[in-house]
Image (spheres, rainbow, N blue to C red):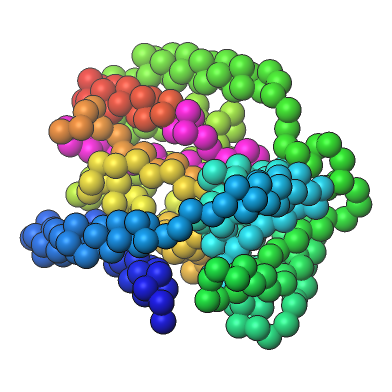
Amino acid sequence: MSQMEEFGEELADFLRRVAELKSARSVPADELLTVLDAAIFELDHVADQLWPTYERLTTDAQPPGATDRDEQRLLRALFQRMPLPVALIDRETVVRRMNFAATGLTGVRAGYATGRPMAGFLVHADRAAFRAQAAAVARGEGDRSLIVHLQHSPRVPVRATLTALHTGTEPRPAVLAVLQPPGPRAQGPSALGPAPDLGEATRHAAQLDLADAMTTALLTAPAGDGGAVLERAAEVLHGRFADWVIADEGAARLRRRAVLGPADAPVADLLAQDPAACPLVVEAARGGAAALQVRPEDPDAFGRDASGAHVLVRAEVTSLLCVPLTAGPHEPVDGVLTLFRSGARLAFSMAEARAVDVLSRHVSLAMRRSL
């Protein structure tokens, strides 16, 4: 095995350990010292081992000639401008590259998609099959083809064709995924992604309207009842901003105050759910940190409802915001607001998450003032 291959495997192992450390943020406070020691050990490993190895490998590498660079630029341009939606993924479906047509079809920007599992862009029912077929192709078991459904348009079948691609510079083959929706959708200019228009200005105006409606609701909420303030805030956010709004009051002892969802949705099952069984809610109440997830990968992230079904799967959640209600970074948490979007609705953006974070502080102040 070459030095570059050994370095790649060691780096992959390091990234897996970092992911485990990130998932340990929710451990009890008396166990955080052990997690901190492990994190410091990993930093020492990077400084003493990985970084010197990287510098040595980059120093020894010979730069490609001008002809090779021109060839690479040409192939990169062909890949990006290809009219068919194409993505280069690894055996675990992690996206390495995605062309313009694929970003238009999936509704996911290439910069966001890179480094994330392509299976996460699909509905939950298709993810396991897509991962299994991609792994089989990467093992050299032949090309595969299957029908999948994208989360932002779950009713439209898309044929995913997977083929192994040997780059010549890597020991393991990559997987080239070609997505073919029915009809000529991916062949026109629209496949290159939406052209800039007034959509951004419209969304900004909608955020201003939301802030105005929230301010009015908080100022007119009944005094002396923090729970009523929380319910008013949930009513403002429901419909115009989120398909689902779940309001939990308290921090150490969470109590579900309100659940607002689409018509004919299993609202009663979510209302009967114990907030302490929702990992996202517990983490927000304990750490005071907001969470924004697009196409949530873990179906257990919001626990199960009263019927025993995964909440995120049953509600067909395509993006979520889980925001603690606190007046400041060092203030106690008064509650947690969780917002879901589902179906073809656009995912929450970073700007929208920032707007909700600001509104959450206003809700917290109103709850304290009313108390």
Residue at (67% x, 57% y) in the render: 87
Q: Residue at x 54, y 62 (%)?
A: 94
Residue 320 x, y percent position in the rendering: 49, 45
Q: Residue furthest right?
A: 183
Question: Percent from the top left, x then y, of residue 194?
Answer: 73, 32
Q: Which residues are magenta?
A: 331-353
Quadrant the N terminus occupies? bottom left
The vertical placement of 133 against 18, above or below, is: below
Residue furthest bottom as drawn = 141
Residue 248 image position (x, y, % from top left): 35, 44
Q: Is residue 257 above or below residue 180?
A: above
Q: Residue at x 79, y 64 (%)?
A: 159
Task: Give the number of marks.
Answer: 0
**Quadrant location of the C terminus?**
top left
Quadrant of residue 233 within the rendered picture: top left
Does residue 229 appear in the picture of this structure?
Answer: no
Q: Is residue 281 left or right of residue 296?
A: left
Relative depth, front residue between 102 and 47: 47
Asked if the stretch drawn in magenta spans residue 350, the answer is: yes
Q: Position of 243 compared to 293: left or right?
A: right
- Is 17 a magenta residue? no
Q: Nearer the viewer, residue 148 or 3?
A: 3
Q: Residue, x 56% and y 57% (percent of image)?
A: 96
Q: In the picture, residue 60 is in which quadrant?
A: bottom left
Q: Is residue 211 visible to us here?
A: yes
Q: Position of residue 204 (x, y in %)?
A: 55, 19
Image: 266 above or below 211? below
Q: Quadrant of residue 188?
A: top right
**Horizontal placement of 266 versus 235: left or right?**
right
